[in-house]
Amino acid sequence: MPPASKAHRPAASRAPRARRGRFVVLDGPDGAGKSTQVQLLAEQLAKRGVHTLSLREPGGTTAGEVIRSLLLERRQDRLTPVAETFLFEAARAQLVEEVIRPALAQGTWVICDRFTLSTLVYQGHAGGVDARAIEQMSKLATGGLKPDLYLVLWVDANVGIARRESRQADRMEAKGRRFIEDVAKAYKKLAGGRRSPYAFIQAAGLVEDVRKRIWERVETLL
Ligand code: TYD
């Protein structure tokens, strides 16, 4: 099993395998609390008898983890936003083909920390890479696979920065305040509108409140 993936099996009975699994994504700015919520969601689904697999992007495959260290190592300061885009999309293509599609086909639910919107926000809106080019690349990388539910956990830049202060910044996080503000704004713009295809969740409050908001959405897929 690749290091970044975590399988949760329900304690008592196994979920029926005939039905395709659901694909749920949690995305949002750094410091929105995604990894905590991915874990809570996986536990809650397991209690309901759903077999889940939790993943994070970039990563989740052997190639993806190598790409991850390339992207997040602080020594690699000179990657251009276009180079980053290719690397994130390459990791994604591998993850979709090698892990996500087979899991869904077996009836496993996949919960993924970040997906295509991250690239559109970080490399596109904040990094300056053409958004349409990114959309094309994401389509190629995913083979058209779309999440059944795409949640965006949103916090403004100040909350995100405060929550991350205790952690050592990686290369993406070290891009500076302006970049972090651009990221937060882009998530709001792309996901916060009335007609947005994303489920926009205010994530500045208590972990338990955010968990409930997420569960309300996920429950509809059961
Ligand atoms: P990670 O430590 O996983 O951050 P987080 O816990 O906030 O998800 O690092 C992922 C970093 O990579 C994060 O700063 C966002 C960035 N990223 C992109 O810039 N583009 C992408 O397409 C993806 C998937 C992530």
Image (tube, helix red, strand yellow):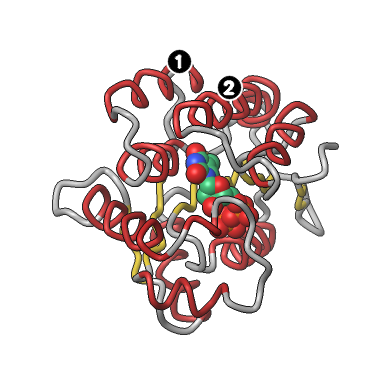
Kind of residue at badge 1: Leu
* Number of numbered tags placed on the structure image: 2
Q: Amino acid at mark 2?
A: Ala
Badge 1 density bin: few <14, some 14–19, many ≥20, Cα 10 Å:
some
* Occupied quadrant, residue 17: top right
Locate residue 116, reporting x and y percent. Answer: 44, 36
| Residue at 45% across, 61% down | 176
Residue for badge 2: 93
Q: Is residue 157 above or below residue 16?
A: below
Q: Residue furthest right?
A: 1
Q: Secondary structure under badge 1?
A: helix
Q: Residue at x 82, y 44 (%)?
A: 3
Image quarter in which the N terminus is found: top right
Q: Is residue 174 above or below residue 158?
A: above
The answer to whether the residue labelled 1 contacts the one labelled 2, judged by CB atoms less than 8 Å apart, is yes
Give percent across and percent down for residue 22: 52, 39
Residue 151, image x and y in percent?
40, 53
Outermost residue to the bottom: 206
Q: Residue at x 75, y 26 (%)?
A: 63
Relative side of 181 to 210, left or right: left
Would residue 9 appear left or right of 25 to someone viewing this image?
right
- Mark 1–mark 2 Cα distance, whole angstroms, equals 8 Å
User: Can you identify the residue that label 1 sits on?
Assistant: 140
Q: What residue sits 34% from the left and 46% below the top?
A: 126
Q: In which image quadrant can residue 135 be found?
A: top left
